[in-house]
Amino acid sequence: MSHYADNPDAIRALVQDKQVHRDVYTSPEIFRLEMKHIFANSWVFVGHESQTPNKGDYFATSIGDQPVIQVRHTNGDINVLLNRCPHKGTKIVIDRQGNTGKFFRCPYHAWSFKTDGCLLAIPLKKGYEGTGLEETQNGKGMKAVGAVQNYRGFIFARLADEGISFEEFFGESLSSFDNMVDRSPAGKLEIMGPPLRYMHKCNWKMLVENQTDTCHPMVAHESSAGTAVKLYEELGLPADAPKPPAMEIIAPFMSPYEMFEDMGIRTWPNGHGHTGVHHSIHSNYSAIPGYFEAMCETYGEEKAKQILGENRHNTVYFPNVMIKGPIQTLRLFIPLAADKTLVESYIYRLVDAPDELTARTAMYNRMINAPTSIVGHDDLEMYERAQEGLAVDGLEWVNIQRLYEDDEDFDTEAVENGTTERQMRNQFHAWVKFMTMDMDPKAAPAREAAE
Amino acid sequence: MTVTKDDLIDFIYEEVRMLDEGRYDEWLALWLPDGHYWMPLDYKQTDPLNVTSLMYEDIFMLKLRVERLNGARTFSQKPKSRCHHVIQRPFVDEMNAEAGTFVTTTFMHYVETRLDEQQLLALTARHEISLVDGKLRIANKRVDIVNCDAAFGNIQLLP
């Protein structure tokens, strides 16, 4: 029986100031409602424009549980269409990417559609004459999402036809995307290869929360980062000798609590936030010859220093994406079920920057984000243990009160101590907002009566 | 020492046995110091550096990986994983006796298990082998998983 549908009071009751009820992670009904409300009403990341550079290029992905296609239209625009034939429901494309030419053609009955979704042709169309097909939703063509925005190459979509604007949804948080793109002397990023795809048997929000959880690296990752430091010390290399790459990438995870406290956390309205306001684990990477010079040529020395001096750690965009500006990485937490999440980790090249930067980004991705990563292994272990542990009855709340302050206002930007859980609270504040914004309490009793 | 085809084939069999029996110190000793263990992410991937791989690890990383397995706070290895290889007879693709360099290709099935989970991966391993001071050593190893682009949970040991 349904308890939460069209019941905003029941949804609000799941999120208190300092704790959230386990149902937000474990309930299949809550998961279905998240797909229907949060993923429909917010702006969700789809892909990068360089994944579909030419007319007819497409890329298949999903927004929440909705299969979608990012496609480059004949006029050069990028459209996002729902991946289903309006006729019988067949997915129009099944491969992850390709080129469809000037139109999509359903492989089942050869209905065809322009790359903006409009119906182009139906074989033996006279069979529909006088039947009123053109008046139906099915007769119009492939359904498009409600709105699409290309922000500096990154494609976002809102499924709902009406709702919050892109600018209002993201506000100042777009500064993290700006910094990532500005790091290219050409002001442009380009996708590099396919993403890592890592399956997690846990709720998608556990992964999102972990991105700003600064009290876990030195604990959960002691076995990888701590062992790296130990092995390096045993080598007895002189201090000025080049360090093994693993030391540069993995060892900073062992940084002491003070480092993480001092780095700071910033939160923005609508559930966005980032760690590493003042510095981060990415601050001390070695300089790559020629890069700073190329940046100065584009921006001038002062601006170049300003761009490269901003070393934000993880920026979380509500609901389900995280970027690392200093190493041009994007992680997408794709919800599959209340207890199943697919993580895709993408990397981008800084156009007109030395290749060594791309190589470092690729190295970071495989060392930290891969299913074969000795860092990822311990994270996954924690999430899956949490998902199983939440079954315990009589202790049904998850604690998020670290550095809680009375009267926190999530509608204004704030900078706090780097170990606060304020960003987790900020996400749940947004979670309630987008979950309940189009619920209809009047529908609930009527529906239950009908059952 | 004259290296025969059988020497190379025995070498490959011995290597997977070391991995399956967890004799990692012996396994690390097979490697030349500048070798890399490469596991591509993409089918027929050619570039290990500028696009993502599942693994592209130097000896420091491999030592770290092995050392970590025995750590007191290696949470994802409590309890430990186990693995098992079933291999076809290796193909000897290149034999350059003069240079002491050899290349083999081996098809195998790899099983990794922990708790109630068990996964099966089909692999192609390509070994570059060198004869150094009378001993065969691994110069480089490339492991292609047949469904490399699929979504995986943890792969914790060495396929």
Image (tube, rainbow, N blue to C red):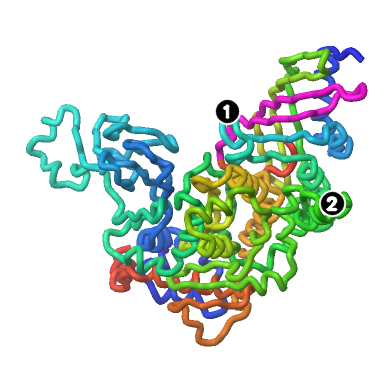
Residue A1: image quadrant is bottom left
Estimate the x, y position of residue A85 in percent, counting from the top left: 29, 39
Q: Is residue A307 magenta?
A: no
Q: How many marks?
A: 2
Estimate the x, y position of residue A129 in percent, counting from the top left: 9, 35
Res A137 visible? yes
Give the prevailing secondary structure in the magenta stretch. strand
x 30%, y 30%: residue: A108
Highlighted range, magenta:
B123-150
> Does label 2 lie on the same chain as label 1?
no
x 71%, y 21%: residue: B105
Res A329 visible? no
Towards the viewer: A25 or A400: A400
Disc 2, SS: helix
Q: Is residue B139 magenta?
A: yes
- Please name the residue that numbered disc 1 is placed on: B44
Towards the viewer: A222 or A267: A267
- Please name the residue that numbered disc 2 is placed on: A231
x 49%, y 46%: residue: A351
Residue type, mark 2 in image: Leu
Question: Which subunit holds the residue at mark 1?
Answer: B
User: Which image quarter holds the C terminus of chain A?
Assistant: bottom left
Question: Which subunit holds the residue at mark 2?
Answer: A
